[in-house]
Image (cartoon, helix red, strand yellow):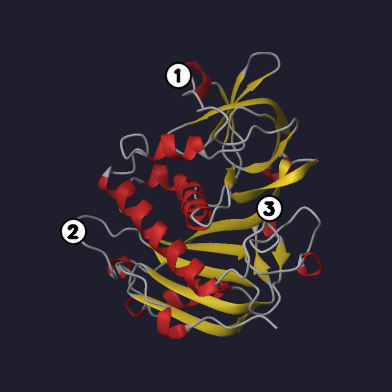
Amino acid sequence: MHPSLSLDRLTVPGFARVDVVETSPSTNAELAAAVRADPAAWPAPSALVAEEQTAGRGRAGRTWETPPRASLTVSVLLRPRVPAETLGWLPLLAGLAVVRAVSDGGVAAAVKWPNDVLLPAPDAVEGLGPYRKVAGILAEVVPEAPGAGSAGATGAGPAAPAVVLGIGLNVSQSAEELPVPTATSLALAGRPRPDRTDVLVRMLGELHAVVRRWEEADGDVAAAGLLDEYRAVSATLGTRVRAELAGGAGEVVGEAVGLDETGALAIRTDAGEARTVTAGDVWHLRRARRPHDRVNRPADPGELVGSPCRAAPDLR
């Protein structure tokens, strides 16, 4: 049996509220409903954590569940003070925060565009290369009544939109407890007896720090130094990929060469065409480089424009 979170150690500097429930169908859906019902009760940043999730929501309407007390299923309410067109960076920056939170224990994590965190594996599998998925992220804007966005906000100007950011991180699952063979957990990756409370506190702390830097740079990830940090841990950039576009809008095949100011993925096709993908599932088609094998070069300006592949992303 997996141990419960230690509530007396669950203090996260900068967070207004961290609630833990025994079970939830979906922490994203539950937190979004709570924010709509009473925005003042949920200042940003706040978090809702479930010891067990029975109908979690992923990208493209996928659902999933977790065994009790074996993973971290948490949804965070944020009101990022950044230009609306840069909100697409939020799930990417959350991935960077998760990488930092789990890497300090000697686990070399990586991010896969747009919303997965991976751990190295001894062999390659289709779509992931020499990695397995350890975490997934989903960000959703919460529609609110006019004027409701002031809770937890500072400064003048229009109210920042409420965004619920869901993170599911596999911590202590055995291979038998994982839903698919392409998944892994911190325990399976060689981290003995991972403490979920410590990992949660670190993860929320890293998220808070990353979002503050992003806000202080007015949403400019390059100026904040976050673009280079993201590139350094990306398993996608520099890799040949197939992007299956949202809504069945086709696919784009080529080399992932960069990210634009909105967080969209720039792909150079085999024909040399520059394409920009804003949402979809990305498959790694050849052995992905390890994130620190080399520093990703910045994409040339011409690689960040071209024929955009517009789909309905979570935050646009």
Residue drawn at (50%, 47%), measured in percent from left and top?
92
Q: Can residue 143 be seen in this view?
A: no
| Label 2 residue SS | loop
Q: Can residue 265 be seen in this view?
A: yes
Instruction: Pick whichever of labels 3 and 1 is earlier in the sequence.
Output: 3
Q: Mark 2 points at which residue?
A: 155
Q: Outermost residue toward the top?
A: 272
Q: In which quarter of the image is the N terminus?
A: bottom right
Q: Residues within 10 Å of mark 1 (few under 14, many from 20)?
A: few
Q: Mark 3 points at which residue?
A: 133
Percent x, y of residue 205: 39, 62
Residue drawn at (58%, 31%), measured in percent from left and top?
237
Give, as a three-letter code, the residue at label 2.
Answer: Gly
Give, as a three-letter code, the residue at label 1.
Answer: Pro
Percent x, y of residue 97: 46, 53
State which quadrant residue 228 falls in: top left
- Which residue is nearer to you in this view: 240 or 206? 206
| Label 3 residue SS | strand
Q: How far apart are marks 2 and 3 (CA)?
A: 39 Å
**Disc number placed over residue 44 in the picture, else none:** none
Residue 277 relative to residue 96: left or right: right
Q: Vertically, is 70 above or below 130?
A: below
Q: Mark 1 points at which residue?
A: 301
State which quadrant residue 146 falls in: bottom left
Instruction: Pick whichever of labels 1 and 2 is earlier in the sequence.
Output: 2
Q: Do the residues labelled 2 and 3 touch (CB within 8 Å)?
A: no
Residue drawn at (48%, 75%), measured in percent from left and top?
48
Give, as a three-letter code, the residue at label 3.
Answer: Lys
